[in-house]
Structures are given as structure tokens and as C-alpha cells.
Image: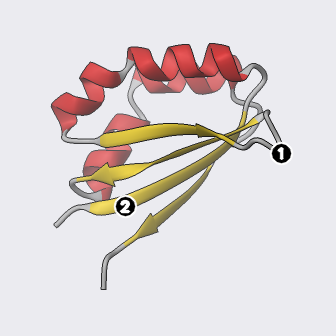
């Protein structure tokens, strides 16, 4: 059963972040992760990623990958807030 994931992050440059996010689409698909990116209209420096992953373990394997961590180091200002949701 998949889990729903919400990631909130403060970014230096939303457009640059979005480009980097989109470049990891093939890696996400390979892992069975389906995410969509959103911008907070009232706080354009805040990005949201909402979607599903097969499990928390699969999510964290992707989240801690060198490619994903390079995004965090280059455009994300502080550790993202991650929320996991399960359908009840």
C-alpha cells in the first residue's frame, strides 16, 4: 500500500528548484514515486511536493540519493518539512 507524502521547503530560487526537480522525474518513476510540484502563491519562496511513494523506505532511499541531496545543497535554504499520510 502506498503512502502520501507532502514536502514543504524554502527555496532560494523557485524556477531553478523546479528545473532541478523535473530533472529527477525518471529516477522517481523508476522508484515508483509519483510527485507533483507546487508553489505557494502567497510565499513564492516556498515549494510543496505532494504525491505518493510505495513506502517510507523507498521514499527515503530516493530522498537521500546523491542527486536529490545536490538539489537540497544548491537551492533549498533549510531542511524540508516532510509529512507522511496513510489512507484510513
Q: Which secondary structure, mark 2?
A: strand
Looking at the rendered image, the quarter that the N terminus falls into is: bottom left
Question: In which image quadrant can residue 41 be found?
Answer: top right
Q: As drawn, is 28 to the left or to the right of 7?
A: left
Q: As drawn, is 50 to the left or to the right of 51?
A: right
For the point 72% across and 43% down, the residue is 40
For the point 26% across and 47% down, the residue is 58
Q: Is residue 66 above or below residue 61?
A: above
Residue 74 got which mark?
none
- Taking the view exactly as shown, the residue that stands out farthest to the front is 41
User: Which residue is more in the foreground, 61 or 11?
Assistant: 11
Q: Pinpoint residue 26: horizontal percent, then vertical percent.
A: 25, 20
Q: Which secondary structure, mark 1?
A: loop
Applied colour scheme: secondary structure
Question: In which image quadrant can residue 54 be found?
Answer: bottom left
Report the label total: 2
User: Which residue is more in the foreground, 23 or 39?
Assistant: 39
| Lower sequence index among marks 2 and 1 | 2
Q: Is residue 48 above or below residue 45?
A: below
For the point 17% across and 29% down, the residue is 30
Q: Pinpoint residue 23: horizontal percent, then vertical percent.
A: 41, 14
- Are the residues flagged by discs 2 and 1 in contact, CB closer than 8 Å? no
User: Which residue is more in the foreground, 37 or 78?
Assistant: 37
Residue named by callout 2: 4
Q: Pinpoint residue 48: horizontal percent, then vertical percent.
A: 60, 44
Measure the alpha-carbon separation of dots 2 and 1: 24 Å
Looking at the rendered image, the quarter that the C terminus falls into is: bottom left
- Taking the view exactly as shown, the residue that stands out farthest to the bottom is 88
Residue 42 got which mark?
1
Amino acid at each position: 500500500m502506498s503512502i502520501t507524502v507532502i514536502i514543504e521547503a524554502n527555496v532560494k530560487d523557485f524556477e531553478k528548484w523546479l528545473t532541478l526537480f523535473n530533472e529527477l522525474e525518471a529516477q522517481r518513476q523508476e522508484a515508483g514515486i509519483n510527485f507533483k510540484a507546487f508553489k505557494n502563491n502567497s510565499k513564492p519562496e516556498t515549494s510543496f511536493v505532494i504525491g505518493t511513494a510505495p513506502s517510507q523506505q523507498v521514499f527515503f532511499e530516493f530522498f537521500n540519493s546523491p542527486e536529490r541531496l545536490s538539489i537540497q545543497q544548491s537551492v533549498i535554504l533549510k531542511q524540508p518539512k516532510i509529512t507522511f499520510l496513510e489512507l484510513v
